[in-house]
Image: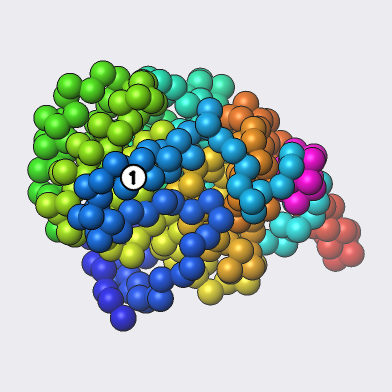
Amino acid sequence: MTKQNVVVSDPNSGINTATFTAAAVQKPPPAPGSCINISRKTLVEINSGPRINSWVDSMRASSPTHHKCTSLSEDNTSWMVHHPSALDMFEQIISASKGKKMVMFLDYDGTLSPIVDDPDQAFMSDAMRGTVRKLARYFPTAIVSGRCRDKVYSFVQLAELYYAGSHGMDIEGPSKDSKYKKGAQAALFQPASEFLPMIVEVYKELLDKTNSINGVRVENNKFCVSVHFRCVDEKKWGELAQQVKSVLKEYPKLRLSQGRKVLEIRPTIKWDKGKALEFLLESLGYANCTDVFPVYIGDDRTDEDAFKVLRERGQGFGILVSKTPKDTYASYSLLEPSEVMIFLRRLVEWKRLSLRRQSKIQKQLEEIKASLKN
């Protein structure tokens, strides 16, 4: 067993203040849709053209514009049979959740906001923000993103949510009265704190190394570094791969994985969005509950870790946001953020009406009891 410390700034916080213990698990076999991890040995040995070409091929595979169905993927019609629209299956979803406590987990980029060329301009709409605010009134809601937690918060601007930044390595939850008290302190969980100086070093080196490549964006996400190549000419991808490799090979405690047109440099600790989901469920008191119903909505390979956790728990489900068939552990699909907003609004309306009916029934029962006493 390995232990990670929880730093709590408010003893009255809603998050569990006990030390969180994460069990070390054996490395699972490669999962459909999981991150492409590049091993330390591969990084050291990538000196020949073919090796770099292989890396560039994996960069193409992570690009939606170059997406090709693999041998494991199915044609679109068959894929939709196995991953139907969450909007079309809304009644079945609600039926499965009855009598259970629904908890919402939402990715940010590509889920609550559209994918844009400039990551600093990935703003969510006021309509989406209003929808998420209403959602949080009825369900515990967390934003789980690869972005720096502070940056995600600056986009979302809702204090009543839980935020898990840097792929879950930087988690903050609201205190009990944070809905109503501005500046309320919250509980923090940062299992990779020791890596902060190293991440800063790598960030600065990557800025310097990639400066000559037009269109590249290097983003410091606190506990990880993101190298965005969405605006980089594909002819320059090989050069970019070489530069990233030359930096990363000097840091054996960091690993590289890929998302949608982004290279992610992260600590080698056993922590990801799936672990973050489990931690948040435990913090909310649902670790061993049979009546919890987690719903995770995301669009990226890194979200597959969370989808996989839900499948293994046999609770709730994942929703993949994608316009194209992909290998995924998610049970349902939505095409784009606009459909995500529609789905969330339907959840809010269903819950509102459900509570109204319960209140009405309770009132009728109380009236019956009162009349019997008389």
Residue 209 vs 9, above or below: the answer is above
What is the quadrant of the N terminus in the image? bottom left
Residue 164 vs 14, above or below: the answer is above
The residue shown at (41%, 33%) is 261
The residue shown at (37%, 65%) is 16
Residue 216 visible in image: yes
Residue 166 rendering spot, x and y as whole percentages: 32, 46
Colour mapping: rainbow
Tell me the crowding category of disc 1: few under 14, some 14 to 19, or many 20 or more residues within 10 angstroms, Cα based.
few
Q: How many marks?
A: 1
The residue shown at (23%, 55%) is 45
Q: Nearer the viewer, residue 271 or 133?
A: 271
Q: Is residue 84 magenta?
A: yes
The residue shown at (30%, 20%) is 215
**Secondary element at tag 1:** helix
Q: Is residue 315 left or right of residue 31?
A: right
Q: Amino acid at mark 1?
A: Pro
Residue beneath disc 1? 50
Residue 196 visible in image: no
Residue furthest bottom as drawn: 1
Residue 119 rendering spot, x and y as whole percentages: 36, 25
> Magenta segment range?
77-90
Q: Nearer the viewer, residue 26 or 341?
A: 26
What is the quadrant of the C terminus in the image? bottom right
Q: Is residue 368 magenta?
A: no
Residue 56 rendering spot, x and y as whole percentages: 37, 38
